[in-house]
Amino acid sequence: MKVAALISGGKDSIFSTYVALHYGWEVEYLVTLLPKRNDSWMFHSVNLDLMKGIADSMKIPLISRETDGEKEKELMDLKRALEGLEIEGVISGAVASDYQRERICKVCDELGLKSFTPIWHKNPEELLKRQINSNFEIMIVAVAAGGMDKEWLGRVLNRKNIDEFIDMCRRNRIHPAGEGGEFETLVLDCPLYWKRFIVEEIEIKWRGDTGYAIVRNIKKEEKSVDDIIESL
């Protein structure tokens, strides 16, 4: 089945693409919406300038479209991005958000496409651990939840700190997938990448209990075929 994957550079959208490829689906396109505002109801907004490099690393064509990020109106921009693509379905990384999933399904229905959410209603703690155990290198690039302080911003989740992170989420009643916008992520490496990303410089912007890590300088490092096979 030929599909397009909606991705933001974050862990859930890229992991859903990873799962889809394991199902044997043909991911023909990556599709990214670029909100002009930080409070889009549907789409992430941090470090989206890196999406071209991520798509190049995955060796999958990227379709990108700007959106004003206005509630409901942004769905029309998603529809325009998908129109005309030779695909049968759309992959998205929704875990628990009915708001996001229902609206993507609506757009797909209007276009005669199937909507697939491979990680829908998966246990969020187990999902996060599975992503780490699948060799996803995940950086936290935005935080917007009480109890999740500045120390996590720009930090990379790994096997050593994942239990600490999950415990912090439990104590502060934060969804471990960040599904409510509590945090956003950037995948620096995973089995789908032919080049890994090494962050050399970030700019931290912090206000109150909300902050962003803006990647200012990043290096791409070629991976050998053996590296990729080992990470699968």
Image (cartoon, rainbow, N blue to C red):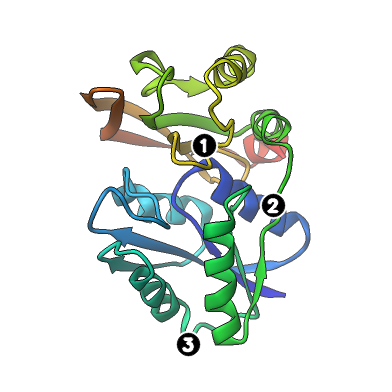
Q: Residue tagged by mark 3?
A: 84
Q: Residue tagged by mark 2?
A: 120
Bin the neighbour count of mark 1 within 10 Å (Cα to Cα): few under 14, some 14-19, many 20 and up.
Answer: some
Look at 53% across and 46% down and name the residue there: 194
Look at 24% across and 53% down and name the residue there: 37
Alpha-carbon span between mark 3 and mark 2: 27 Å
Q: Nearer the viewer, residue 74 or 131?
A: 74
Element carrying mark 2: loop
Q: Is residue 153 left or right of residue 84?
A: left
Position in image of residue 14 (x %, y %): 56, 49
Position in image of residue 122 (x %, y %): 73, 43
> Which of the two labelled residues, at mark 1 and mark 3, occupies the earlier sequence position?
3
Q: Are marks 2 and 1 in contact (CB under 8 Å)?
A: no
Q: How many circles with numbers are drawn on the protein?
A: 3
Q: Are marks 1 and 3 in contact (CB under 8 Å)?
A: no
Which amino acid type is marked by label 3?
A: Gly
Element carrying mark 1: loop
Bin the neighbour count of mark 3 within 10 Å (Cα to Cα): few under 14, some 14-19, many 20 and up.
Answer: few
Position in image of residue 140 (x %, y %): 43, 29
Q: Could you say which quadrant of the image residue 126 lies in?
A: top right
- Mark nearest the camera among 1 and 3 is 1
Which amino acid type is marked by label 1?
A: Gly
> Which of the two labelled residues, at mark 2 and mark 1, occupies the earlier sequence position?
2
Look at 68% across and 29% down and name the residue there: 125
* Disc on res. 178: 1
Q: Is residue 154 left or right of residue 26?
A: left
